[in-house]
């Protein structure tokens, strides 16, 4: 989370500031700028790009270890499934809130298969919004997520949840296949 | 029945459903037994409620300029609720504010005994 990537994991040191202006970030920040103004004019567009570049230079972030190439259809499928899950999660939590029986929970460790930080973050964020889980701890070294799961009856149900979480990771990995090159020292 | 009437009815339904979900989230925060369960109530119905209210506002205003802003609200709400629920949950677990009697399985306490130093990534 450090803003300037001075020391990298393989020991080389370099200022990351000049690499901080990433095209994707600039496009995204420009879109945010336009959304805030609520209209698109040439002046706003130019201003937005300038502000985006300025933000990228002032608050440099390490580049995301991006995937080798997204598969749009599978990505859409992941997104659609995710939206369905968000609705299911809300209904489920609402039902738990309203019933009288006390709720039983579990803390489950999920060892992710992928070693990419990007996938770890994405899966953690998605798991937080879908049925019954809040990320309690994330361990980057082993790529383990510890999830608090709401409304778990027994160890069997906890196991089922672990399978669901790993299935979600598999769907994400299929939609965003990771780069085939080796991950240096991570 | 014109197009605008349909949109208005849809907007009303969205606003009502969203408000009900936000209410349920509030009830959940009150009724749940411990902090981690409360975080569930405070995040999920709350996020969907926000999404529905924003959809309702968009359908009622029918102004293309506002749609981008509403989508931004939804996106930031999703990002913020994920991060805040994680940070609060993590802090409470590390501080020992957990009702272990409510947990069927607890795989985190087992590893925390011989743990990495605090603050390790």
Image (cartoon, rainbow, N blue to C red):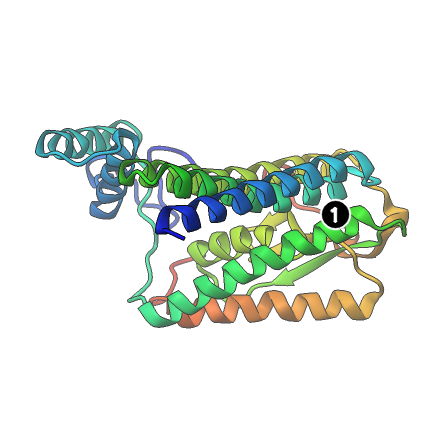
Mark 1: secondary structure: helix
Q: Which residue lies furthest to the front in this view?
A: B1
> Between residues A94 and B55, which one lies in front from this camera angle?
B55
- How many labels, in total? 1
Report the residue at 63% width, 59% height from top: A88
- Taking the image as shown, residue B115 lies to the left or right of residue A119, namely right
Report the residue at 70% width, 46% height from top: B115
Residue A101 point in image, percent of width and height = 90, 52
- Taking the image as shown, residue B68 lies to the left or right of residue A154, namely left
Quarter of the image with the N terminus of chain A is top left
> Between residues B12 and A180, which one lies in front from this camera angle?
B12
Residue B112 point in image, percent of width and height = 74, 47
Residue A6 point in image, percent of width and height = 33, 36
Chain of the residue under the numbered disc 1 shown in the image:
B
Report the residue at 43% width, 51% height from top: B6
Report the residue at 42% width, 54% height from top: A118
Evaluate whether residue A154 shows in this view. yes
Evaluate whether residue A71 shows in this view. no
Image quadrant assignment for residue A51: top left
> What residue sits right under mark 1 in the picture?
B112
Vertical arrangement, residue A89 with respect to residue A179, above or below: above
Residue A172 point in image, percent of width and height = 45, 66
> Between residues A67 and A78, which one lies in front from this camera angle?
A78
- Taking the image as shown, residue A39 lies to the left or right of residue A186, namely left
Q: Residues within 10 Å of mark 1 (few under 14, many from 20)?
A: few
Quarter of the image with the C terminus of chain A is bottom left
> Between residues A6 and B30, which one lies in front from this camera angle?
B30
Vertical arrangement, residue A59 with respect to residue A10, above or below: above
Image quadrant assignment for residue B25: top right
């Amino acid at each position: 989370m450090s803003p300037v990537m001075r020391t990298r994991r393989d020991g080389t040191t370099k200022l990351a500031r000049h690499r901080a202006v990433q095209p994707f970030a600039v496009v995204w920040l420009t879109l945010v700028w336009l959304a805030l103004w609520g209209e698109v004019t040439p002046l706003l567009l130019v201003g937005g790009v300038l502000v985006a570049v300025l933000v990228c230079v002032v608050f440099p972030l390490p580049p995301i270890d991006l995937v080798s190439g997204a598969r749009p259809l599978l990505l859409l499928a992941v997104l659609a499934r995710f939206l369905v899950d968000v609705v299911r999660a809300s209904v489920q939590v609402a039902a738990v809130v309203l019933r009288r029986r006390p709720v039983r929970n579990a803390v489950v460790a999920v060892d992710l298969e992928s070693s990419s930080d990007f996938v770890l973050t994405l899966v953690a964020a998605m798991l937080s919004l879908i049925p019954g889980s809040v990320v309690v701890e994330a361990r980057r070294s082993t790529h383990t997520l510890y999830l608090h799961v709401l409304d778990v009856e027994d160890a069997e149900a906890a196991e089922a949840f672990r399978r669901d979480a790993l299935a979600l990771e598999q769907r994400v990995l299929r939609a965003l296949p990771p780069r085939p090159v080796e991950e240096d020292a991570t | 029945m014109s197009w605008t009437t349909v949109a208005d009815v849809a907007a009303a339904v969205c606003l009502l459903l969203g408000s009900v979900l936000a209410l349920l989230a509030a009830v959940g925060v009150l009724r749940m037994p411990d902090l981690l369960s409360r975080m569930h109530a405070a995040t999920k119905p709350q996020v969907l409620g926000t999404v529905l209210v924003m959809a309702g506002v968009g359908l009622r205003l029918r102004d293309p300029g506002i749609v981008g802003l509403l989508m931004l609200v939804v996106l930031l709400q999703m990002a913020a609720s994920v991060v805040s629920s994680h940070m609060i949950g993590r802090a409470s677990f590390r501080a020992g504010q957990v009702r272990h009697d409510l947990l069927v399985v607890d795989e985190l306490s087992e590893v925390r005994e011989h743990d990495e130093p605090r603050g390790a990534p």
